[in-house]
Image (cartoon, rainbow, N blue to C red):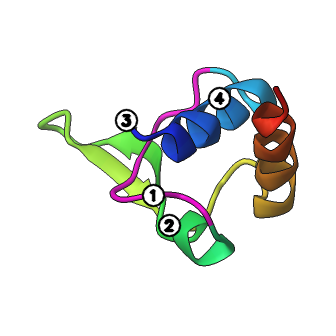
């Protein structure tokens, strides 16, 4: 996982631990954030049911970016 994606994942964990999601590529912009697949359930074959609209009010691009920026500080 790239450093940028590590920061994204850590920011999500800070805002809402145990959030299930999937993504491809780097998450560096709001456009990237809007492509994240947020788990909303599973079908009868245990495949992920998802949406690209984040269903968690505590997770927004603004809040994620703020946490990511804090993580960049060494």
Query: Considering the numbered disc 2 on the image, is that residue within a helix, a strand or a loop?
Result: loop
Query: Considering the numbered disc 4 on the image, is that residue within a helix, a strand or a loop?
Result: helix
Residue position marked by numbered label 4 in the rendering:
10
Disc ID at residue 52: 2
Query: Which range of residues does the magenta coloring cover?
Result: 18-28
Most extreme residue toward the front is: 74
**Could you give the CA–CA distance between mark 3 and mark 2, rounded to whole angstroms?**
21 Å
> Which of the 4 image quarters holds residue 33?
bottom right
N-terminal of the two: label 4 or label 3? 3
Would you call the spot at circle 1 few (<14 residues within 10 Å), some (14-19), or many (20 or more)? some
**Could you give the CA–CA distance between mark 1 and mark 3, rounded to whole angstroms?**
9 Å
- Residue 74 in sight in this render: yes
Residue position marked by numbered label 3 in the rendering:
1
Quadrant into which the C terminus falls: top right
**Could you give the CA–CA distance between mark 1 and mark 2, rounded to whole angstroms?**
16 Å
Q: Is residue 72 left or right of residue 37?
A: right
Residues under numbered marks 1 and 2 in contact, where contact means CB atoms less than 8 Å apart? no
Residue position marked by numbered label 1 in the rendering:
26
């Amino acid at each position: 996982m790239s450093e940028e994606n590590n920061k994204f994942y850590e920011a999500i964990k800070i805002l809402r631990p145990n959030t299930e999601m999937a993504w491809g590529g780097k998450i560096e912009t709001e456009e990237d954030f809007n492509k994240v697949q947020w788990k909303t359930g599973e079908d009868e074959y245990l495949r992920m049911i998802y949406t690209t609209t984040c269903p968690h009010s505590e997770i927004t691009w603004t809040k994620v970016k703020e946490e990511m920026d804090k993580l960049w500080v060494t």
